Amino acid sequence: MAETSSETMEGLMNNFHAAIGKEALKEIMSNFSEEESIQGMFRTLWSVQEAHKHLTPKLVFSEKSDEEANRLRGLGNDFLIKRDLKQALETFTQSIMVASHPDIMSPEQRSGKAFETLSLCYARRSAALFELQLYDLCLLDIERANGCPKLKQELNERQKECLSLLKTSSKSQSSNSNSLEDKASIPKLVEPSSIIPCVSSSCKIAYMQEKGRHIIASKKINPGDVILVEKAYCSSLSLDRLATHCSTCLRECLAPLPCPYCTMVVFCSIKCQLEGLSRFHWLECNILSTICSLNMMASFSNCFKILERKSCSQWRTILQRLDDRNAKYSPEKRGVNDKEIFSSEDFDLFYSQVTNAEERPSGDLYVKCLIAFVLVKLLQLGGRLFRDEKGQALNPPEEDTLFLGQFLFSSLMKNSCNGFGIIEFQQHRPPLPAESFISCGSHSIIQIPQKVYYVSIPH
């Protein structure tokens, strides 16, 4: 289980401000303005020794606990007896999340009694799924229970019943809600633009000094016409959905797989589990509970998902190339890829998005920079971003650390200008915040007339 901590982002800031005093804070703040570059602002904060002392959080560890898993399993059994099936299912899932788990990179660890608690938790969740008539998922959990010796006969009988019911049923009830891409009713552009494939040919890019780059109509648009269908460049869950939605594909899942190493996130399938662990979640796994305890905004995850795709040296080369290319273009063309196309799936377009740094008050610039500072310190403590050829943690050159901070600082501002929150509407529930994503198809000032999000509606 995660240890508790009284630290919050606001608390770190207050301690830092108290340590340096009003005059020093005023001097630091004088460097945060539209005249200063992002690089210059981050370097200013990084050069303050007191910042390293007071803005370095204490790590909050998210540890597995079989004792807690057994407690939750017992609580789930109580709910199951009372026929509170929804609560039973949620509680069994919580028990699975905190139970000791084999290292999935070493499948041989699956044998033996070391993970008996996990098998018991899967076995009990299979009982809740059976009662909910979710037979397909029930079978998966029976398999995950790995022939739990204590419940072997019960599991075998349940497995036979599931198979029999699935054979006689015209169709099994589906458990996991469809992902955004899965919905058959997602509209398609009848005639995409040759320059902006995610936008209708009835639109074009325009530029005005006071409004920046934006999309305008180039011909008549009728009510109901589809003008933009875009796959997000980067998307992530809000923090309160980490335990109910897959961190990789964002789909809601009733019987998820846990992270084998922390107690914070879940995955809908082995495929998503392996993808998450080999990419973005591996970077955040040992610091995610600290980020949550600090009450930091969810956009950090988008930043991590972008950052983990390349090394700092590779990003520096890419950014220099894009700076050189964009310098040759007028403002309305900055962000095109090598094929002279604005593609939402390319980093080129994301990089060209506005930060609106020149429009932000100094206080907002300072807070965004401070958050980037804390994220850098957390990545240093996590020890997973900078590695040598053998995979061992190393201390990066100062320039790499500064580049990392500037990258995060800029990404946080771009996310706040260009990111959208999605509301997930579900039957029998009030609207719940599902995820945020970075969109490249609209501008922070000129908004798309109507945005329609296709999300899961489980029956």
Image (cartoon, grey):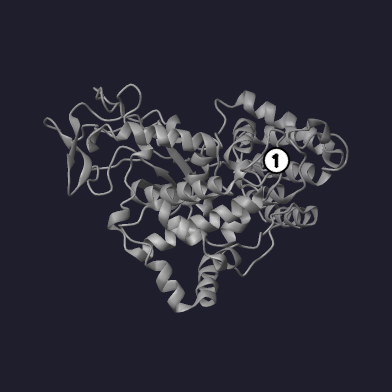
**Vertical side of 72 occupied by 189: above or below:** above
Q: Quick check: can you spot residue 400?
A: yes
Q: Residues within 10 Å of mark 1 (few under 14, many from 20)?
A: many
Q: Residue at x 83, y 43 (%)?
A: 116
**The quarter of the displayed image where residue 137 is located:** top right
Counting from the top left corner in percent of width and height, residue 330 is at 22, 35
Residue at numbered disc 1: 126
**Vertical side of 65 occupied by 6: above or below:** below
Left or right position of 258 against 321: right
Q: Quadrant of the N terminus?
A: bottom right
Counting from the top left corner in percent of width and height, residue 405 is at 50, 51
Total numbered labels: 1
Q: Residue at x 82, y 35 (%)?
A: 109
Counting from the top left corner in percent of width and height, residue 158 is at 74, 35
Foreground residue among 147 and 164: 147
Return the residue found at the far left.
220
Q: Residue at x 19, y 31 (%)?
A: 204
**Vertical side of 79 occupied by 232: above or below:** above
Foreground residue among 145 and 257: 257
**The quarter of the displayed image where residue 339 is located:** top left
Circle 1: element type: helix
Counting from the top left corner in percent of width and height, residue 371 is at 49, 58
Q: Report the amino acid beneath label 1.
A: Ser
Left or right position of 272 against 30: right
**The quarter of the displayed image where residue 275 is located:** top right
